[in-house]
Amino acid sequence: MTLETERLILRPWEESDAEACYQYARDPLVGPAAGWPAHTSVENSRQVIREFLMVPETYAIVLKETGLPVGSIGLHHNDLAKEANEAELGYWIGVPYWGRGLVPEAAKEVLRHAFEDLKLIRVWCAYYDGNTKSKRVQEKLGFTHQWTTESVPVPQMGEIRKGHVNLMTRDEWLRISKEKSEQE
Ligand SMILES: CC(C)(COP(=O)(O)OP(=O)(O)OC[C@H]1O[C@@H](n2cnc3c(N)ncnc32)[C@H](O)[C@@H]1OP(=O)(O)O)[C@@H](O)C(=O)NCCC(=O)NCCS
């Protein structure tokens, strides 16, 4: 499955993306904020692509301008999103591309896909305390705060952190989409 926005193509990851992935995922400002360690080599990125990124509903964020992946976005099932009709949204993008609204642009399309095509009824989105950039993305998308947990295990980092959980329901998404189309 490939999705498209004004500036982006969202397409499945491929092993041949390893070098591009490493270029951004090696930066300690990226993965640790999301709960995974910075990649250590191109081979490490290839392994992560094979094990974690080449899965259904995870997309490489590819800039139309260059044709290269600069980040990742996906819908996942986990402890937060256990049922078949719900998912958790996760994302990251390389530091040189921060602040251009690219992840919100990608996320809007992934949310449309989630609610319209996959017929999900709930999309969760969480962030660790202090990740104001991700908090801001979720606010801009229209997610609403559900609860905060003082001690969330972050297994890949061997840490315990405070976490905030947000939600968007299908009804909220429909309302946001309607308001947007009325403004246009
Ligand atoms: C969180 C993240 C995905 C945001 O993506 P993005 O495409 O830059 O999103 P936006 O352009 O909408 O920027 C979001 C906020 O980040 C902040 N920001 C933007 N550029 C920044 C920069 N260069 N340095 C510091 N903060 C910056 C701003 O507060 C911005 O909010 P604003 O639009 O109200 O000004 C990105 O910062 C990232 O990949 N971070 C590391 C991984 C991560 O935290 N993933 C999410 C885990 S829950």
Image: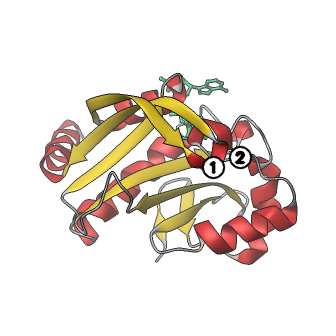
Along the viewing direction, whichever of 21 and 146 lies nearer the viewer: 146
Give the labeled residue for mark 2.
Answer: 37
Residue type at mark 2 is: Pro
The quadrant the C terminus occupies is top left
The part of the image, by quadrant, that contains residue 138 is: top left
Label 1 close to label 2 by CB (< 8 Å): yes
The part of the image, by quadrant, that contains residue 49 is: bottom right
Report the image quarter containing ligand 1: top right
User: Which of the numbered marks, if any, corresponds to residue 156?
Assistant: 1
Along the viewing direction, whichever of 150 and 112 lies nearer the viewer: 150
Helix, strand or loop under label 1: helix
Q: Residues within 10 Å of mark 1 (few under 14, many from 20)?
A: few
Residue 164 location (% of width, % of height): 38, 31
Compared with 176, 139 (above or below) is above
Q: Residue at x 87, y 58 (%)?
A: 41
Along the viewing direction, whichever of 22 and 103 lies nearer the viewer: 22
Residue 46 location (% of width, % of height): 77, 69
